[in-house]
Amino acid sequence: MPRLLPRVRAQLALLTRRRRRLSNDLLEGDYASVFHGRSPDFDDLRPYLPGDEVRDIDWRASARHPEPLVRRRTAQRRMRLAIVAGNGAELSALGPAGTQKRDTAVLAAGMLAVVAARHGDDVLLVSGSGGRSRVSRPGRADGHLESLLQTLHSPAAEPGGPAAPLRTLAAMRVPRMLVLVIADDGPLPEEARRLLPGLRHRHEMLWLDLADADLTEALPGDGRAAPLVDVLAGEGLQTPALPGRLAHEYRAAEAARLAGRARLLRRHGIPQARVNHAVDVPAALHRLLRGLPAPATAAAPASGATSPHAPGTPRTGSAGRRT
């Protein structure tokens, strides 16, 4: 079984190098300034990272040092990151770029976990499928992070979704955590919607949606040469070309569904982003950690709504290649 953590670190370095403003240090600074609280108990100093709050700079100490120094507070030592994801069959489906969504999920979870571990914070995974969920122990060693990523990269055969992991998280009696929810693009179950207000009150919540493939269009690079299957039913998919007007109505319904979920999360004060491809992950994490609203093109799915489909047209998130 190939190791995933070295691959995540390599992709983090490559992707952030391509986008100069989204450097590795910038994500580190985002994490330090947004996630960690402002305890009045001073602990020590560390070098300034892009994205740190200017008010945290110790100017007197910095004057005697070749680079700015930032005050690190005791509260920064006691934080925990929870990755919440349904690792059901949906993660085997294809995204808009024609790649499996589990690869994007692993990259997003891995990037934030690596940054958290560098800050000395423990990471845990709450995953679930088939209505059941499991909670990993917290930790920050490389072997622990690798185990979490392998769990995400090996989705179960039955359907997953965020409801069961969120239910488990709501039942946990733990201190305030940073929670990254990695969700499929499908309708949000009613149970998950009911849990959001309480979870947002107890934790710092971030929400990342993995976009579905648009099966009304050819996937990049494959020309539809490989047969497609419904990863939930295990059956082949027929994706007939839709007439222009019907395709327009279908996309409009999907856009309304996505905007509905974005409104729901915004109403509860949960930063949300939606990614189409692995290259979008660093920018999405940057937006989430800074608490910025996602652009209109990155809106997320509606809460529990279903979109009208033409006969024979599948929901976009259920597609995968037959292997």
Image (cartoon, rainbow, N blue to C red):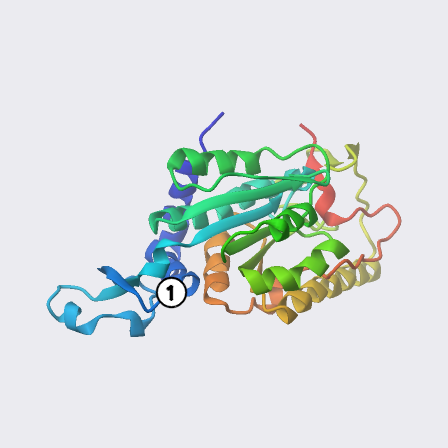
In the rendered image, the residue lying farthest to the right is: 311
How many neighbours does mark 1 have within 10 angstroms: few (below 14), some (14-19), or many (20 or more)?
A: many
Q: Position of residue 268 (x, y in %)?
A: 63, 68
Q: Residue at x 74, y 62 (%)?
A: 257
| In this view, 262 is above or below 221 | below
In the rendered image, the residue lying farthest to the front is: 173
| In this view, 280 is above or below 135 | below
- Give left or right: position of 280 versus 90: left
Residue annotated with mark 1: 33
Q: Is residue 120 visible?
A: yes
The image quarter containing residue 322 is top right
Q: Nearer the viewer, residue 261 or 202?
A: 202
Q: Position of residue 200 (x, y in %)?
A: 59, 63
Q: Nearer the viewer, residue 253 or 141?
A: 141
Count the marks: 1
Q: Residue at x 56, y 66 (%)?
A: 294
Q: Nearer the viewer, residue 136 or 156?
A: 136
In the rendered image, the residue lying farthest to the left is: 64
Name the element at disc 1: helix
Q: Position of residue 250 (x, y in %)?
A: 79, 59
Q: Position of residue 98 (x, y in %)?
A: 62, 43
